[in-house]
Amino acid sequence: SQQGEEDPQALSIQEGENATMNCSYKTSINNLQWYRQNSGRGLVHLILIRSNEREKHSGRLRVTLDTSKKSSSLLITASRAADTASYFCATDEVAGNNRLAFGKGNQVVVIP
Amino acid sequence: EPEVTQTPSHQVTQMGQEVILRCVPISNHLYFYWYRQILGQKVEFLVSFYNNEISEKSEIFDDQFSVERPDGSNFTLKIRSTKLEDSAMYFCASSPERRNEQFFGPGTRLTVL
């Protein structure tokens, strides 16, 4: 089955800098969702972008979706130490029945 | 803000024992899910549930697994005879509509000895 794959796997940045993560997938999707996970904790929903959308903003988050390249990016602007976490993309596949297929995740460390 | 809750936060059991993991989805949500995450690996879909029946299940969700919505608020995952490889974090999620955001609970860490 299709799996999202994020790139890069690990990112270390200074507080105040922007962090960008990418995700690629292989099949047709209805939407793509980004989640944050702090170490050993639950998954926090960040943003959903539908297949007919190209860009979406939520606070300091900006998500883009390119269905022709089957890829998405998550940009966190003006990062804070509290943004230190793992970030996952998850795709809702057309072939599926509402299930999400998760990528491996990006570890982001924001240095104060 | 409404949240998905899960109990217990950590469950330790012996191989071969039955476990029941409990979830309370967000109250007006109609779609319910279980996922699991083995340590260091991806989050994997197990099962989705709607209108009191399973909508979809993965290859992982074999005859040892079952789900139930015994009342109007709880959603449970039962593993009939646990194996060592069932050790993982189990997440419950819910969504108000199909093809919508899925909101996850904090997870239950299952350790099978």
Image (tube, coloured by chain):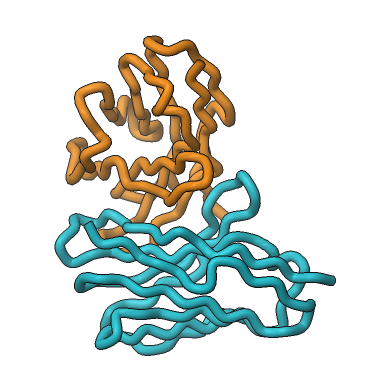
Query: Is residue B51 visible in the rendered structure shown here?
Result: no
Residue at 31% across, 61% down: A3
Residue at 30% across, 30% down: B69
| Left or right: residue A2 compared with residue A47 | left
Residue projecting furthest to the right:
A112
Front-lying residue, B11 or B86: B86
Q: State the image quarter where residue A85 is shown.
A: bottom right
Q: State the image quarter where residue A13 is shown.
A: bottom right
Residue projecting furthest to the left:
A95
Q: In the picture, which quadrant includes the N terminus of chain A?
A: bottom left
Q: Position of residue B86 (x, y in %)?
A: 40, 28
- Establish if A88 lies above or below A56: above
Q: State the image quarter where residue A96 is shown.
A: bottom left
Q: Which chain is cyan?
A: A
Q: Which chain is orange?
A: B
| Left or right: residue B109 compared with residue A78 | left
Query: Is residue B105 visible in the rendered structure shown here?
Result: yes
- Establish if A87 lies above or below A61: above
Residue at 77% across, 83% down: A16
Residue at 37% across, 29% down: B76
- Establish if A78 lies above or below B38: below
Q: Position of residue A66 (x, y in %)?
A: 33, 86
Q: In the picture, which quadrant includes the C terminus of chain A?
A: bottom right
